[in-house]
Structures are given as C-alpha cells and as structure tokens.
Amino acid sequence: MADADPSTDIDATARARLRAIRQSLGWSLDDLAERANVGPSTISRIETGNRALSLDVLMPLARALGIGVDVLVAPDDDEDVVIRPSPSTHGDLTIWPLSRPDGSTTAFKFRLEPHDPAEGLPELQARAHVHPGYDWMFVIEGRVLLMLGERRIVVETGEAAEFSTMTPHAMVAIEKPAETVMIFDRHGERAHLHTA
C-alpha cells in the first residue's frame, strides 16, 4: 500500500485555513478578493480544491489576511501548541510574548512597576503615545492606572479594559507591581514594543 502524498495534506490544510481565517474575519469572497486583488472565483476554486495552489496567488491572499504564507502551509504539529515565553526587560517594564508573531493579533504578559510619586503626572503623561489600532488589557495582579487622554482610570485585579489607541494612552502600576495580559492588533504591537 502506497504512503499518502504529503503535498495533498498540505494543500488540504492550506485550503481549510484560508477559508477558516477569511470566515473568522467575517469576510466574503468578494471582501478578500478586493483586498488581495485576486478574483473571487479564483479564491472560491482554491478553497474548494478546484484550482492548484501557487505562491503567486497565496502571497497576496496571505498579505490581505495579515498573515505569512507559512501560516497557511505549515503542517499540523503538536510541538507548535506550547509557547515558552522568554521575558525581556525594558526599564520598569518586563514583557513575555504569549503568542506567535505571525497572527493578526498578538498577546503579551506585562509586569509594570509602580509609579514614583516624585516623578509627577506630567512626566507620566509624557510617556503617553498615539498610534493606529486597538488594545485590550486584563489585570492579573495589582492595580493599574490607565491614562486615556485626560481621563484617569484605575483598573483593578480581575478587570479588563479595551480602548482605541488613537487616544493618547499610558499605564503604570499603583503602589506595587502589577501584572497584565494585553492583546494588540498588529499596529498596537509594533507601537508598544518600539516604545518599550
């Protein structure tokens, strides 16, 4: 009995992932076609297996979906399930990456050190920044002062905050270190890690 052709498995996986990612974004074939500059009938034939996969089509589709081609064609592998984050420290901030770097959103654990009252709010406001995107934060431990423009919001342990990053924003732990999990879209990840 002949072994199964591994390229057939990769094709099937890529087709299923393409459809699943498109649908998870709520995009129709026409939506993806417009963003990728690929005909909707071509995308339909790729998803249903009626057209051969080729890089000249997969690359613009992956780019439009905000992923790498490797996300579509990577074999299913149990070793990829577990992420072992390594922390990096930037001043009073320690960051652990909690997701793979190739998705449309990324997750990080942050440890924030408390604000020095002698530093004053003007100094803290100078840290505030604006960038395209959206952020989501969950406080695992401690209390966080979230500054959104002129607003000051205390986010307690077990609470979450979600906000547009087009508002000047900064955050700091209150009284003792705080730990948060944050999810960024791709714009937010670039801006926050560059700032750190």
Image (cartoon, rainbow, N blue to C red):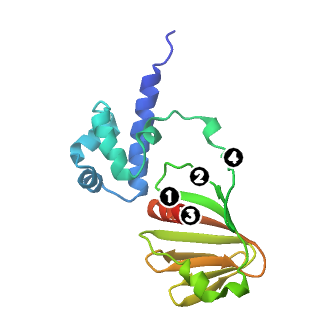
Residue 84 bears which disc, if any? 4
Q: Which residue position is annotated with label 1? A: 105
Mark 3 vs 1, N-terminal side: 1
| Tag 3–tag 2 contact (CB < 8 Å) | no
| Tag 3–tag 1 contact (CB < 8 Å) | yes
Mark 2 vs 1, N-terminal side: 2
Q: Callout 2 environment at 10 Å: few (<14), some (14 to 19), or many (20+)?
A: some
Q: Secondary structure at mark 1?
A: strand
Relative to 137, is 78 above or below? above
Relative to 78, is 94 above or below? below
- Taking the spot 27% from the left edge, 54% from the top edge, the residue there is 35
For the residues labelled 3 and 1, the Cα–Cα distance comes to: 7 Å
| Tag 2–tag 1 contact (CB < 8 Å) | yes
Q: Amino acid at mark 2?
A: Ser
For the residues labelled 2 and 1, the Cα–Cα distance comes to: 9 Å
Mark 4 vs 3, N-terminal side: 4
In this view of the protein, which residue sits in the foreground, 194 or 182? 194
Q: Which residue position is annotated with label 3? A: 183
Q: Which residue position is annotated with label 2? A: 99
For the residues labelled 3 and 2, the Cα–Cα distance comes to: 10 Å
Left or right position of 35 against 177: left
For the residues labelled 4 and 3, the Cα–Cα distance comes to: 17 Å
Residue 162, image x and y in percent? 54, 75
